[in-house]
Image: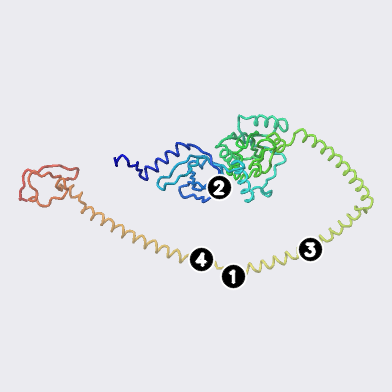
Amino acid sequence: MMAQELPHIFTVSSLTREIREHLETHFPLVWVSGEVSNLRQPLSGHFYFTLKDAAAQLRAVLFKGNHQHLRYKPEEGGQVLCRGRVTVYEPRGEYQLVVDYLEPLGLGALAQAFEALKQRLQAEGLFEERHKKPLPYLPRRLALVTSPTGAVVRDFLRLQKQRFPGLEVLIYPVKVQGVEAAGEIAQALDDLARYPGLDVIVLARGGGSLEDLWPFNEESLARAIHRCPIPVVSAVGHEVDFTIADFVADVRAPTPSAAVELVMPERAELCRRLELLSASLSRGCRRRLQEARRQAHLLSRRLPDLRQRLQVERLRIDERAEILIRRLRRHLASQSQRVHLFHSRLFLLSPRRAVTAAQQCLEQHNQRLFLSWHRRAQEIRRHLDYCRSHLQQLNPQAILARGYAVATRLPEGTVIRDALTVPPDTPVRVRVARGCLDCQVKEVSAKQ
């Protein structure tokens, strides 16, 4: 009776496990709103925080694998909306919310991420006018970075052929929507920056929602536009659509079609303006020429008779030329005498005799040196011959050639100097002048 009346006794672990299973069964997926507090992110990369309101609080965790794809990250004091499942952390007996999605309350996550990145890049100065590069008036080569399958390419090329058919257009195909789009567009800008002769780059995409245009709001693409040395035109979406790329680019076009009008003039309009300028220039040149002729005619009447003055100047020049020639001849004669005098003195002081004596002495020493080295070389040669013959006599191979042999014990290879130290049936190797003989000892004798 006593055993039957005792209640069921739980252990702490079993009770906690029952509670966890009950919570996970009745709250498989819940949405919770609240204020983020006690936010921390250890080395593991997970976010641990507390959701609270005026009356209660709830522990929450956002694992690294879940928040890597989120554009909004939790911030201390931020009002957020979380989706997750309720569970119990058994080691501490605390229930918590395991979050798999999180977004800020009020403003959407994409819009808030857009504003946060815009403010940060603006604070760094990426939007300032001093970084904007002017577009060339008449580009020769243009690059269009867009999707090759969209209508943007067809419309752009159609308008380009209407406005300026001679312009070279390079199509760089990229994705303009999706996770990989921003990386491909940034890589395209880096590649085109090294392309020779490129004058303008146009980033083009049709309209869409904020999610569709989000690749043009990525920080990596914004920094790629900022470091590109070639002017970049952003033609993304419709006129009411604004992206981070629009603020960083050198020029923003409301639409891809408007980008054609911004980057290239209309050829027919250019030809018409050239004709007008040419006609105006011709008229101006004719007026200037007529005025110059009239001024020249008036000035010619005021000028004196230059032919008479020219004759007088010619006579004066001839007279001065004769005087200069006489002075020059006297000067040359005086200099010739001085040169002759100096030549005579140099001949007397010439070191040629001393040089001749030094050459003779040098030749004598050279001959003595040659004879001395010749004798020394003969002595060295005789000594080398003596050493060569002596080494030949001491060469073991020469001794073997005279009929001798060297016996070594196998397998050690030690030289046998005493026959009594080798027992019968021992393998030996006998080296002669040409080759070796592998033998086996049959009998050992002490006879010489």
Please state, as top left, top right, bottom left or bottom right, where the N terminus lies in the image. top left
Please give the residue where the numbered disc 3 appears in the rendered image.
Answer: 326
Q: Is 42 or 250 nearer to us in this picture?
A: 42
Inter-mark Cα distance, 1 to 4? 15 Å
Residue 392 located left or right of residue 218: left
Q: Is 17 or 319 nearer to us in this picture?
A: 17
Total numbered labels placed on residues in the image = 4
Inter-mark Cα distance, 3 to 4? 46 Å
First in sequence, mark 2 or 3: give its number: 2
Inter-mark Cα distance, 2 to 3? 119 Å
Pointer 1: residues within 10 angstroms few (<14), some, or many (20+)? few
Q: Helix, strand or loop at disc 3?
A: helix
Q: Helix, strand or loop at disc 1?
A: helix
Residue 371 located left or right of residue 304: left
Q: Amino acid type of disc 1?
A: Leu
Q: Where is residue 38 in the image (x, y as percent from the top left)?
A: 51, 51
**Camera-side mark, 3 or 1:** 3
Q: What's the residue at 68%, 41% (across, down)?
A: 252
Q: Is residue 272 above or below residue 331?
A: above
First in sequence, mark 3 or 4: give its number: 3
Circle on res. 53: 2
Q: Amino acid type of disc 3?
A: Arg
Pointer 4: residues within 10 angstroms few (<14), some, or many (20+)? few
Circle on res. 356: 4
Q: Helix, strand or loop at disc 2?
A: loop
Circle on res. 348: 1
Q: Amino acid type of disc 4?
A: Thr
